[in-house]
Structures are given as C-alpha cells and as structure tokens.
Amino acid sequence: MSLFVPEFDETVVVRAAGAEVVGRAPTTVRLLADSGATGGALSTQRVTLREGADGAGPHRHDHSAEMFFLLDGAADILSGDGVVTAGPGDLVVVPPGRPHAFAAVPGADADLLIVLTPGVERFEYFRHLQRIALGEAAPESLLEVQELYDNHFLRSRARDTRRHAAGERAAEG
C-alpha cells in the first residue's frame, strides 16, 4: 500500500461568494476546490438538491473514495447494493470501485458537502453536465470522458427499486 502525500504548500480558502455555481434548481453545484488547487489531495463541491431531486446516478470511481457529509435535509445514498438514508450531520464514505449514487429523499431537500480523495480534476465535468442540461452537448458525450474524470456510469437495481418505491409513496401521500 502506498501512502499518498499531497504536494501543495498554501492554505486553500474559498469564500462562499467566490465559489462558481453550476446548474439551477432543483440541482445546484458549488465548485469549491479542484484537485489542482490541493496538490491532488482532494476535490470538493457542495451540492444542493430540492424536493427529491436526483444528484448523481449510479457510478463508480476507480481511484478515489467519495465522502458525503449531509449539511441539511435528507438524502438517499446508494453504496454497493444498499441504500442509506442520511440526515443532517451524517457522514457516508464510499470506497474506490464501489457503485454509488445520491438523491434527495422524495419530498425533501438535501444539502451535501462532497469530497473525493485523492482528488480528480472535476470542475470541467460539472460544467460539461451543465452544457448537457442546456442542450449544448449530447448526453452520450459523457461516455467519452468517463476515464478522464474517473466517473464510470452503471446501472443499479437497488437504486432503481428504491427510487421507484419512494416515488409511489410520495404520489400516494
């Protein structure tokens, strides 16, 4: 096992007003610190999901663990074949290679701090997602950049079943 030692020697400070925001309700992403700013130690963003919105569909990272810290609200986080519902102050860490996804619980908002470590340059990935949402790029263009962003898309029966059941409960309620 090798020990990763980041190579940066300056404190990284990102002021709330200075963070780039991509997306728009129901999903916004505040780009906080990319891998290049932290010498590869981590990349981090804050994701705000409104009223049961999906965050990311099932995927895996081969080279990074992903940490989800729930600042507020409630989120369903897929990890492997299980789904954990997290509330304010809860922490979920998904190891490299494990399928995962996240979404706000139906009928609820979720505000998450997300950290990948070691870091991957990911800000351009989120900008790419915004271009897709605006119709400026095709959704299948993401398949071409999976390796670049260490973001490999998957299918998950556990997540699909959970989201479908939750959607039915919300419709009945």
Image (cartoon, rainbow, N blue to C red):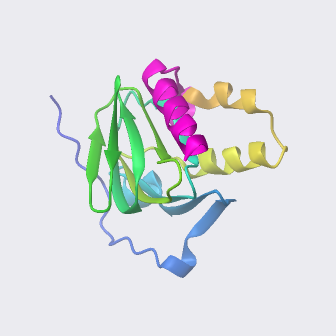
- Is 84 covered by the magenta stretch? no
Furthest residue to the front? 172
Residue at 34% x, 44% y is 85
Q: Going by the image, does 31 lie left or right of 90?
A: right
Q: Residue 121, position in %: x, y?
A: 50, 47
Within the image, what quadrant is residue 49 found in? bottom right
- Is 170 covered by the magenta stretch? yes
Furthest residue to the right? 135
User: Does residue 72 appear in the picture of this structure?
Assistant: yes
36 shown above or below 165: below
Range shown magenta: 147-173
153 shown above or below 34: above
Q: Nearer the viewer, residue 8 or 145?
A: 145
Residue at 47% x, 56% y is 34
User: Does residue 151 appear in the picture of this structure?
Assistant: no
Q: Residue 132, position in %: x, y?
A: 76, 42
Q: Residue 56, position in %: x, y?
A: 54, 40
Residue at 67% x, 26% y is 144
Q: Nearer the viewer, residue 163 or 165?
A: 165
76 shown above or below 32: above
Judged by its main secondary structure, the magenta piece is: helix
Q: Going by the image, does 62 lie left or right of 130?
A: left
Q: Quadrant of the N terminus?
A: top left
Within the image, what quadrant is residue 27 found in? bottom right
Residue at 52% x, 26% y is 160
Q: Residue 145, position in %: x, y?
A: 62, 30
Q: Nearer the viewer, residue 90 or 32?
A: 90
Q: Nearer the viewer, residue 56 or 76?
A: 76
Circle count: 0
